[in-house]
Image: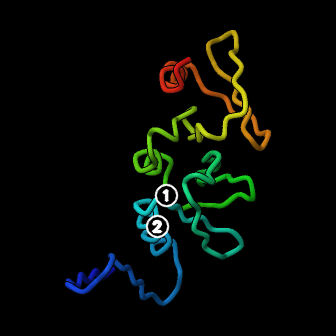
Amino acid sequence: MKIHIIYDDTAQEPELTVVCRELDDEVRKVLAAAQVSENRLTGVKEGQIFLLRHGDVIYIDTADKKTFIYTSEDVYETQLRLYELENQLPAADFFRANKSCIAGIRHIRSIRADIDGRLLLTMDTGDKLWVSRQYAADFRKKIGM
């Protein structure tokens, strides 16, 4: 992959142009990383790339070595790994719920404590997510519980 940086004193904002023969996994990963820095994530659905605002993300989950972004509208796949997303998403709005899931705090409808120290979250969509014991204490601090 070639990278060219052009300095332009008249530029109003940074601009990213991608020239490629095809939209392969490497190009998708570059686009996904660029969008995270702009408070957006890129998600792929049916061969199309969608720009998703952080506030629209209810949770992010991994399954079968793939990472999926869940919104109230749909489910999208991303090329970024969960740890990459965790490091780049705003800590005030997102938290690690378990080893395969990051959840958006703003989309939690209810919280139920379980006997073994885990927490069961019900999200705005009705989806249920477990916060494992490993992450439950940090989550409780974050929301003042």
Query: Camera-side residue: 64 or 71?
Result: 71
**Can the viewer see residue 101 in this picture?**
no
Instruction: Check disc 1 and report the residue beneath it.
Output: 80
SS type, badge 2: helix
**Can the viewer see residue 70 in this picture?**
yes
- Residue 72 drawn above or below residue 35: above
Query: Camera-side residue: 14 or 133?
Result: 14
Residue 92 coordinates in the image, percent (x, y):
46, 38
Name the outermost residue toward the top.
115
Disc on the earlier residue, 2 or 1:
2
- Identified at 40% across, 46% down, the residue is 87
- Identified at 63% across, 19% down, the residue is 118
**Mark 1: few/some/many CA within 10 Å (<14, 14-19, 20+):** many
Quadrant of residue 1 in the image?
bottom left
Q: Is residue 72 left or right of residue 52?
A: right
Q: Label 2 sits on what residue type?
A: Lys
- Residue 95 drawn above or below residue 39: above
SS type, badge 1: loop
Callout 2–callout 1 Cβ contact below 8 Å: yes
- Residue 135 drawn above or below residue 92: above
Residue 19 coordinates in the image, percent (x, y):
42, 88
Residue 34 coordinates in the image, percent (x, y):
41, 67
Residues at marks 2 and 1, CA–CA distance in whole angstroms = 6 Å
- Identified at 44% across, 45% down, the residue is 90
The circle drawn on residue 57 is none
Quadrant of residue 100 in the image?
top right
Residue 50 coordinates in the image, percent (x, y):
61, 70
Location of the C terminus (image quadrant)? top right
Quadrant of residue 9 in the image?
bottom left
Q: Label 1 sits on what residue type?
A: Leu
